[in-house]
Image (cartoon, rainbow, N blue to C red):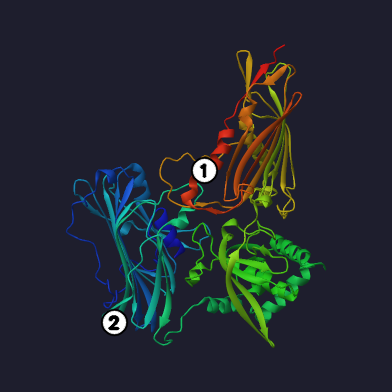
Amino acid sequence: MKFLSAARATTLAVLLAAAMPLLAQTVPTTLQYATYTWDAKRTKRLAVSEEEIKQPALMLRDFTAHEYLYSPQDKGLKLYSTEHRIVRVNTSEGIERFNKIYIPQDGGQLLFLKARTISPRGEVVEVNESSIKELKDEDGRRGYKIFAVEGVEKGSEIEYVFLRERAPKFFGRDYLQSDLPARDVTFELISPEALTFDARVYHGPAASRDTVLAGKRHIRMKLTQVPAAHEEAFAETGAERMRVEYKLAYSAQRGRTRLFTWSDASQYLHENIYTLGKDEAKAADRVLKAAKVPAGDTETRVRALEQYLKTNFNVQEGGDFNLARVAATHNASDVGITRLFGALLKRLSIEHELVVTTDRSDVVFDESFDSWNYLDNYALYFPETKQLLAPARPDFRYGMVPSGWTANKGLFVRTVKLGSTESAVGTVREIPTLSAEQSPSDLDIKVKFTPELDKAFVDLHQVLGGYHAQEIQPFYSLIPEEKRTEILQALVKSSVPDATFQSVKVTNGEAGLSPLSKPFLIDANVESVALLNKAGQRYLFKIGDLLGPQSELYQVEARQYDVENDFNRRYNRIITLELPAGYQVRNLQDLNADVKAGPDAKDPLYYFNSKYDVQGQIVKVTITEAYRQIRWPKKDFEAFREVVNAAANFNKVVLVLEKKKS
């Protein structure tokens, strides 16, 4: 479902199984939509409005029906999905986006596929089956079917309908909204009467209640119009899209006992992660011996274990799950490396809990809807230290996990012992994020001028910690030597765009460091001509440029979504300006700003403050800015926007240097 969801949110490419030749399989006659197809007589395009014509592309029909059907031949359930799309392409951009259909093969079967175009003149061109090609991923593991839709021009419709068969998945997610406006959006979930699914719609109207018709259960929703989901700054637009989540909740055999609960998931995950075969147990013992974990407190031992595993084992798609093979090849899947961490932590008697969650930039974990589709990402939690670790992320160290996993709920699975038997207890809890102080981006800049006032000398000290450092520190040691200087200079040039470098160096660029305890430090000494310009008898100094580019929130449209930050963060900047002898600053008051948001004015959640102090020829500017809460309601968006724009406004400040009056 991840592939299908991503495609419908972006390219709306068709994502379905295609292991068998087209039309090589028999469609079950009892399937609800066994004979579903397009209107073969239609040659006229569907009518669109003048406003819709202005869009690069428009979804005119978006039909999806998933049916769980018993297969007498296989003596089990099969999942059949019928999908039908009609896309109007109005521009070259729209044509480029939709003139190819990609069909990944994921072990299922493509039973039926047709595609055609209808031109503005009513000319109908069907896709020739012989034009379908098969591609492979770079690693050769996943195959794709791909075909081009010929004869597409501006104003054409691209229409395709297909039926696929897969092994049943009892948890699903379909997106009902993309960045395109859509009409005639239909979703239907069909199952045997003995199986009851629950469905929940997010950011949209509810689906119909479960209805039994002719021995089949139907959940359905039909939407006449679905607006496009537009990107917004300081929002997780992907997670805000209208979607439907569904899961198998009850069966006639189990009565009113709910299926696939969080408790069931906890037991399943615990067994999956912690149960080892004999060969796996021996392999874990060998790895632990090689790790040479020192004695000490919990944090010391966890850090040492993590450092060994993350520098000696590779995590990759297609890596192994079995610990005997993981130990032999040093290649593991996400689950494989999590199992290895779990096995070694148990051998070290280090108390921990398994945590599984979503990334809130994709979907927010919903405790009230117990779909295992939310169980995507593995973390480990240590109750003694209240810290988290991401076992399958070599770029993160103890105390940090990807920010999208935090400020989100997750399933915490704790091991309990009943005599000699181990079991699991699961609870859904909040995953805390780092404080703003733990993710600093600080600058200490000293500026002085040549006697001729033709250039500025700038000494810059930059501190990147927490999530700010995460973007570069874990990878810096892997960058070829000749590229490092280029990257560092680019970072410095965000503050001094025309910098001529005298020196630049990094501290804490080694592999395996935690940016929480050892932030990434950059020190540079540069010269600049562009920061200082002459204007008659005065000089203009672009002090605001030293902050680097700032986010701006000058949007005119009404805010769609609540504010959501990726992580809490803090900025402390000190700019010390040594004025030339005989000169003063005419407009020092432009350096003052104090903007804040939050219910407590004395301890605001968001703020931007700048002030100055003058001692002789030294002007010292102190700027503090912080974002200390992940979410903020859109009803109070203006207060948040004022803080963001205060930083952007300072970015435009230019100091006027003039001679002192005698």
Q: Which residue is drawn at 57% across and 49% down?
A: 598
Query: Which element is circle 2 on?
Result: loop
Horizontal side of residue 229 vs 263, given as left or right: left
Q: Where is the N terminus found, in terms of image quarters?
A: bottom left
Rendered residue at 63%/71% (across/down)? 354
Rendered location of residue 273, percent (x, y): 62, 75
Quadrant, the C terminus: top right
Q: Which mark is residue 641?
A: 1
Quadrant for residue 485, please give it: top right
Residue 311 is left or right of residue 162, and the answer is right
Q: Which amino acid does label 2 sit on?
A: Gly
Q: Is mark 2 in CB contact (under 8 Å) with mark 1?
A: no
Q: In this view, does 172 lie to the left or right of 388?
A: left
Report the side of 515 relative to 160 (left or right): right
In front of the other: 583 or 59:
583
Q: Is residue 149 visible?
A: yes
Distance of mark 2 from mark 1, alpha carbons? 55 Å
Mark 2, residue position: 215
Residue 17, how many percent across, how many down?
A: 40, 66
Residue 562 image offset from top left, x and y in percent: 48, 52
